[in-house]
Image (spheres, grey):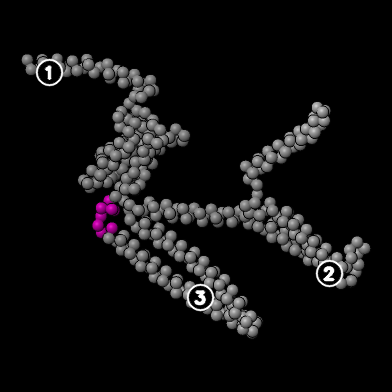
Amino acid sequence: MGPFSSRSRLLLVLLLILAPCVRAAAQTDSGGGLGLTEVLTPREQATLLYANRPITVLRARVLASRPSDRAAAAVARLDELLGNNQSGPVTSRVEKGVAFIRVGDRDVITLLPADLDALTTETMESKGREAADRLHGALAEAVELRTPSRMFWAGARAIGATIAFVLLMVGLLQIHRRVTKYLIEMTEQRIGRMLPTTSAVRPHGAWFASVERRATTIALFLISVILTYGWTTFVLRQFPYTRPWGESMRGFLLARFSRLGLNIIQAIPDVFMVLVIAIAARVVVQLSNRVFRSIESGEFSVPWIHPDTAAATRRFTAAILWVLALMVAYPYIPGMRATPSRASVSSSAWSSHGLAEPQADALPQFRSEVR
């Protein structure tokens, strides 16, 4: 009984010493201060990454464990599970306001209410479900990364795509040379038929050859950029670690093309209006030119237009008509409509200008009264 009684007394002394500390920590945590959990600033928050995939964002500090420490501990547990050939099933559950992400029969990630984004409407259930879905994909890719046969076939596909890419680039260079040579020869032949004199053919042929060479070079560059982008995306998507980068590149390209197509579709009515205005302006200008040419030739006369000045008046009238057409078509030109910010700036400028005019008019009067 001697040793047991001494051990009991030691435990009782430790409980008496630690009781005030535990009570103070509980009071601090219930009061909303720096207790058991704390929401940290965005700089101190951490994104849990596994297999180069974002799983979830950790925002809370738990006791002395910062979000980066919690993420590192979760990665260590996942590596241990994969080392034991355990990669699923991945489930999530919520108990007493805390979400637990489980792989097999082991909890690997714990999400607290302080981890929720206060600026969104996410809940513990939605955050846990999303993290479980992402973790399921990341674990599948981690298993793929540790499977030699799958990595071998991924490397084979990447090498095959690289060989095909190199052959296409070499073929494009050959096609570029042949097309450029063919266009230059055809241009020189046509210019030679129109201008048989050698001294006149050479400068025109050299200019056209330079233009065609630059045009084919630009076309080759654009095709090469598209092929390089596609090859890079395909190769990155073959390997688990670089697959997120390939998917982001493909998503970026698809988003840009979809946005471009949507902008083109939305601009079709405006482009149609611009074409209608341009056609109408051209018809009016042609009618005006025909009238002034008739006056210039003496077919009929107008008292206030002299035949000698009809040519200058015709050009001036045509310029005025085109300027008016441009003013009418300007709001319909894609990208030329005033945005709300521009409209507010212009309205504020006009209002300030309107307010400044009476002050400017009153200033001389004020000076005269003072004198």
**Could you tell which of marks 2 and 1 lies nearer the N-terminus?**
1
Label 2 and label 1: CA atoms lie apart by 122 Å
**Could you tell which of marks 2 and 3 lies nearer the N-terminus?**
3
Task: Look at mark 2 in the image and give the residue it sits on.
Answer: 293
Whole-percent x, y for residue 45 in the image: 38, 36
Task: Look at mark 1 in the image and give the residue it sits on.
Answer: 7
Whole-percent x, y for residue 365 in the image: 81, 31
Q: Give the camera-side residue of 56 and 170.
A: 170
Does residue 100 appear anywhere in the picture? no
Q: Amino acid at mark 2?
A: Arg
Taking the image as shown, residue 315 lies to the left or right of residue 302, namely left
Q: Residue at x 66, y 43 (%)?
A: 343
Label ID, residue 179: 3
Looking at the image, which residue sits at the far right?
303
- Looking at the figure, which quarter contains the N terminus? top left
Vertical position of residue 29 compared to residue 356: above or below: above
Nearer the camera: disc 3 or disc 1: 3
Q: Amino acid at mark 3?
A: Val
Q: Residue at x 78, y 32 (%)?
A: 363
- Magenta segment's dominant SS is helix
The stretch in magenta equals 143-151
